[in-house]
Image (spheres, rainbow, N blue to C red):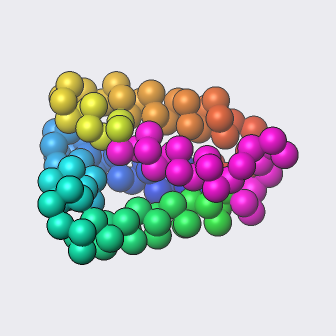
Amino acid sequence: CLKNFFSCYFKKFEEFGCKRGCPIGSLVLELADTNENFRLKLLEWSTFLEDGIYEILKNSNLKNNIDARSLSSFIISNFEGALLKAKLEKSLKPVDEFNYYIFEVLLKEEEVQ
């Protein structure tokens, strides 16, 4: 479920030639420091997405020492970072690294893929 969500998103990103990326991430970069109301609305989106990932993670077989809330925040941060780096490099390598480390290293043995 979680892996499919990111796969669909990254497929569209690839179709656009590593352009556009995440519209919310782009707006955060442009508006978060200029208007508090924009920042709060963008924070709502980020929180909504993070909460969705958290719900998936907490209902999976995460190891006991992994905090699902913290991991969901980490995944969002890495998702946004991978898109930014992929846009900069015009390469899918950061996307491939995201997928590898999130789904093959961190969540490999979990039932969230």
Q: Is residue 19 above or below residue 91?
A: below
Is residue 73 one of those drawn in magenta? yes
Q: Who is closer to the viewer here, 1 or 74? A: 74
Is the stretch drawn in magenta largely helix, strand or loop? helix
* Residue found at the very far right of the displayed protein: 64
Number of numbered tags placed on the structure image: 0
Instruction: State which region is magenta.
Output: 58-80
The image shows residue 94 at horizontal and vertical percentages of: 36, 29
Q: Quadrant of residue 77?
A: top left
Quadrant of the snapshot with the N terminus: bottom right
Is residue 75 one of those drawn in magenta? yes
Q: Is residue 41 above or below residue 100?
A: below
What residue lies at 46% left-to-right and 56% top-to-bottom? 5
Q: Quadrant of residue 65?
A: top right
The reply to whether residue 74 is in sight is yes
Indicate left or right for 58 with 21 as reference.
right
Q: Is residue 101 above or below residue 38?
A: above
Q: Is residue 17 above or below residue 26?
A: above
The image shows residue 52 at horizontal and vertical percentages of: 55, 66
What residue lies at 46% left-to-right and 34% top-to-bottom? 98
Q: Who is closer to the viewer here, 57 or 26? A: 26
The reply to whether residue 23 is in sight is no
Indicate left or right for 82 with 50 as reference.
left
What residue lies at 39% left-to-right and 71% top-to-bottom? 44
